[in-house]
Amino acid sequence: MYNLLKIGALIAAGRFLKPRLKGLLILAAFWFLVSFLHSEYRSYVELSGNADYLITASLTKIVLYVLAFFFYVLSTERKILQRTQQDIEVRTTQERASGQDDGFDFLREKKKLQDSAEQLLNKD
């Protein structure tokens, strides 16, 4: 039972990470580089005792983290969202073009559906 859940979780994680893997690796590498450079600067400050720009360096590190994350979202996640929306549009046009009646076309054509209270009022 648990093996089936583990396999399902691995498949779901793989399907989620596959289109994002390149962007996530670039983001992680950039964050690692910024963290390394900041720690090197902090080591320099400890040795020299010159802490004039330490706050500026820390704020710059945070700003670079946030900008890198926004760049990741704009470059990777937006592409995935656009592909998903295009796939949905293609599927709906294919379903409508195939002409198969699933029994709910009369509901799709209506402009406004009535709830149960409106149906009871209109029954009289």
Image: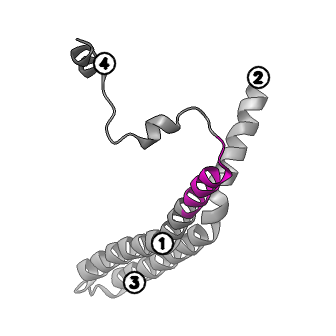
Report the residue marked by disc 3: 41
Report the residue marked by disc 1: 72
> Answer yes or no: do the residues labelled 3 and 4 have beta carbons within 8 Å?
no
Determine the CA span between mark 1 and mark 3.
Answer: 26 Å
Nearer to us in this view, 23 or 76:
76
Give the secondary structure at mark 1.
helix
Between disc 1 and disc 3, whose residue precedes? 3
Is residue 98 a member of the stretch shown in magenta? Answer: yes
Q: Nearer the viewer, mark 2 or mark 4?
A: 4
Q: Is residue 32 left or right of residue 64?
A: right
Q: Nearer the viewer, mark 3 or mark 2?
A: 2
Q: Which mark, by number, is residue 12?
A: none
Q: Mark 1 Cα within 10 Å, few/some/many (few <14, many 20+)?
A: some
At which x and y percent is residue 50?
27, 87
Determine the CA span between mark 3 and mark 4.
Answer: 68 Å
Q: How is the image coloured?
A: one colour
Report the residue marked by disc 4: 116
Q: Mark 4 Cα within 10 Å, few/some/many (few <14, many 20+)?
A: few
Determine the CA span between mark 2 and mark 4.
Answer: 42 Å
Q: Is residue 78 left or right of residue 42?
A: right
Amino acid at circle 3: Tyr
Q: Residue at x 34, y 83 (%)?
A: 45
Report the residue marked by disc 2: 1
Give the secondary structure at mark 3.
helix
